[in-house]
Amino acid sequence: MNTFKTIDTEYIRASITIETILVSNKNSSAVFYLYNYEGNSYRVFASHLALINFFQDKVESDFHFSTETELDTFLSNVKVSVQN
């Protein structure tokens, strides 16, 4: 099981944020980017470029969740690899 923690939060508006999340287990870690739209829509991106492309209407998010519980379950179980 992974642990995860928010390492940066950018506020677009009070209820809309972009969070940088470090997900790790005892052997590996990965960074994900979370677009939190008013606590009703959570879009997770595996790279910063994917996040930028989403805002330019070029791609959809890698993962999308409607509840914080679904998001937490995903982050707890997502496969992470060693960062170089």
Image (cartoon, helix red, strand yellow):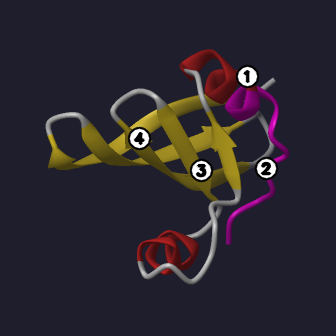
Q: Is residue 39 magenta?
A: no
What amino acid is at disc 1? Thr
The label shown at residue 80 is 2
Give the CA separation, mark 4 to mark 2.
Answer: 21 Å
The residue wearing badge 4 is 36
Q: Mark 3 packing: few (<14 Cα in 10 Å), some, or many (20+)?
A: many
Q: Nearer the viewer, residue 52 or 81?
A: 52
Q: Is residue 33 left or right of residue 66?
A: left
Count numbered badges in the picture. Answer: 4
Position above or below: 1 against 57? above
**Residue plotted at (14% across, 36% down):** 14
In the displayed structure, would residue 44 be above or below residue 69?
below
Q: Three-letter amino acid code at disc 2?
A: Val
Instruction: Looking at the picture, tell me which residue is in the foreground, 38 or 23.
Output: 38
Residue 82 location, quadrant: bottom right
Quadrant including the C terminus: bottom right
**Residue closer to the observer: 74 or 63:** 63
Residue numbers of the magenta segment? 74-84
Which is more foreground, mark 2 or mark 3? 3
Q: Earlier in the sequence, mark 3 or mark 1?
A: 3
Residue at the image point whose x is 59% and y is 50% from the top: 44
Q: Residues within 10 Å of mark 4 (few under 14, many from 20)?
A: many
Q: Which label sits in the foreground, 4 or 1?
A: 4
Horizontally, residue 78 falls left or right of residue 31, namely right
N-terminal-most mark, 2 or 1: 1
Q: Quadrant of the N terminus?
A: top right
Residue bearing the label numbered 3: 44
How far separated are the C-alphas under marks 4 and 3? 9 Å
> Mark 4 or 2, which is nearer the eye?
4
| Alpha carbons under labels 3 and 1: distance apart | 13 Å
Q: Which badge, 4 or 3, comes first in the chain's sequence?
A: 4
Residue under pointer 1: 73
